[in-house]
Image (cartoon, helix red, strand yellow):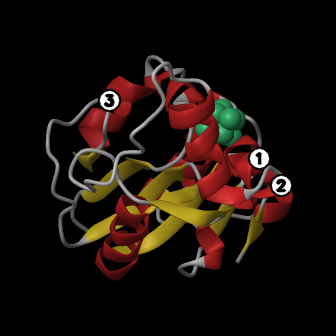
Amino acid sequence: MGRLRLATAWLGGCSGCHMSFLDMDEFLLDLADLADLVFSPPLVDTKVYPEGVDLVLVEGAVCNAEHLALIRTIRRRTRLVVALGDCAVTGNVSAIRNVLGGASAVLGRSYLENCDPPGPIPSDPDLVPTLLDRVVPVHAVVDVDLFLPGCPPSGPTIRAVLEKVIAGEPVDPGTLGLHFG
Ligand code: SF4
């Protein structure tokens, strides 16, 4: 088997899950010897999600139109999609606006009630991506192969998954406290 093509993606999350990825510390150097990181917001300077990715760790919930387009592209171009962290798995804190009246209520609160003078609410999707009315977890939009819960999941847990995939071994959800979709 050739070198694995790995990726990480950042949807609606706080970056804490990516901090855990970076918390793998010296294993990141081993990873660079074993696999190619082809897309990753904190580490790889590219905006286009490539074809032929073996595994992607997806942080965050699906909150806006850009997230929706990206996760659909990711699914088409990736063999194993991992929902990384509670926002990706359940919506978590990213989905709090669902119980506060949805996107229109949040936009009104941010741009009308808390602005002096109020408004306007941004309407150019090239400047501010259009918010979905409901925030949803990744599996509500695309099939997910592995759920990696935690807020955030620990660096050693992420490492354990990557080591198994790199070794070509099946990930045993029971030993990791995970479950497959
Ligand atoms: Fe941040 Fe927790 Fe969501 Fe990860 S799961 S993006 S650490 S809030």
Res. 153 visible in picture? no
Q: Answer with left or right where residue 18 lies relative to residue 140.
A: left
* Occupied quadrant, residue 54: bottom left
What residue is drawn where x is 16% and y is 57%? 48
Q: Answer with left or right where residue 137 lies relative to residue 53.
A: right
What residue is drawn where x is 71% and y is 55%? 91
What residue is drawn where x is 24% and y is 45%? 127
Q: Are marks 1 and 2 in contact (CB under 8 Å)?
A: yes
86 or 120, which lies in front? 120
* Marker disc for residue 99: 2
Q: Answer with left or right where residue 2 lies relative to residue 99.
A: left
Sequence-first disc among 1 and 3: 3
The Cα atoms of the two marked residues, 1 and 3, are separated by 25 Å
Query: Regarding ligand 1, which quadrant of the image does it lie in?
Result: top right
In the image, residue 79 lies at what x, y percent?
Answer: 40, 76
* Marker disc for residue 70: none
Q: Secondary structure at mark 1?
A: helix
Q: Residues within 10 Å of mark 2 (few under 14, many from 20)?
A: few
Q: The disc labelled 3 sits on which kind of residue?
A: Pro
What residue is drawn where x is 56% and y is 55%? 164
Image quadrant in which the N terminus is located: bottom left
In the image, residue 16 lies at what x, y percent?
Answer: 59, 28
The number of callouts visible is 3
* Residue denoted by label 1: 96
The Cα atoms of the two marked residues, 2 and 3, are separated by 31 Å
* Residue denoted by label 3: 42
Q: Answer with left or right where residue 46 lies relative to residue 12.
A: left
